[in-house]
Amino acid sequence: MRYSYKQKCIVCRKDYAIVTWKDRNPVCVKCKMKEIARPIKDGKFKKLFDIDKTLYEKSGFLRNIKSSYLRFGNLSEKQVEMFKKVAQEIKHEKPVKKGHREFLEQEIPLEFLRF
Ligand SMILES: [Zn+2]
């Protein structure tokens, strides 16, 4: 079942976060941005994650991938590919394609974000 609703952020308990069927720990964008702002030592991933901050602010998917990397220290080939693809999509997103990004993110299977 697909649903989403707003719930108070579990970190700051001030702002609201969107809770979806695949992400049940509500963390607001501000707190998540802080969480993923940690420096990356690995050259390959440092380059991969070196994209405009606003792209992370716009996309929960990009935030989750970076958060996964920080947690596990690695990503699968497929995750790297999807990260690049989604980052490009958002960067070149046209206003007429309203809702397209959400659609794209919803199509990404759960196992993709977890190991
Ligand atoms: Zn918060």
Image (cartoon, rainbow, N blue to C red):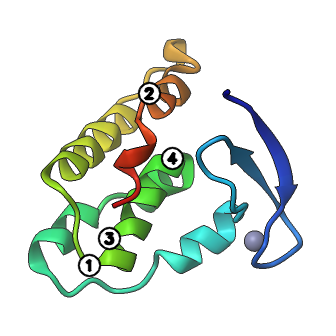
Question: Is 60 on the left-hand or right-hand side of 4?
Answer: left
Q: Are marks 3 and 2 in contact (CB under 8 Å)?
A: no
Q: Assign the N terminus to one quadrant of the image.
A: top right
Question: Is 1 on the left-hand or right-hand side of 68?
Answer: right
Q: Are marks 1 and 3 in contact (CB under 8 Å)?
A: yes
Q: Nearer the viewer, residue 9 or 90?
A: 9
- Mark 4: which amino acid? Ser
Question: Is 13 on the left-hand or right-hand side of 71?
Answer: right
Q: Which residue is mark 2?
A: 107
2 or 1: tag closer to the N-terminus? 1
Question: Which label sits on residue 69?
Answer: 3
Q: Position of residue 50 (x, y in %)?
A: 27, 66
- Mark 2: which amino acid? Glu
3 or 2: tag closer to the N-terminus? 3
Q: Which residue is mark 4?
A: 59
Give the Cα separation between the discs numbered 2 and 1.
25 Å
- Mark 3: which amino acid? Tyr
Question: Which label sits on residue 85?
Answer: none
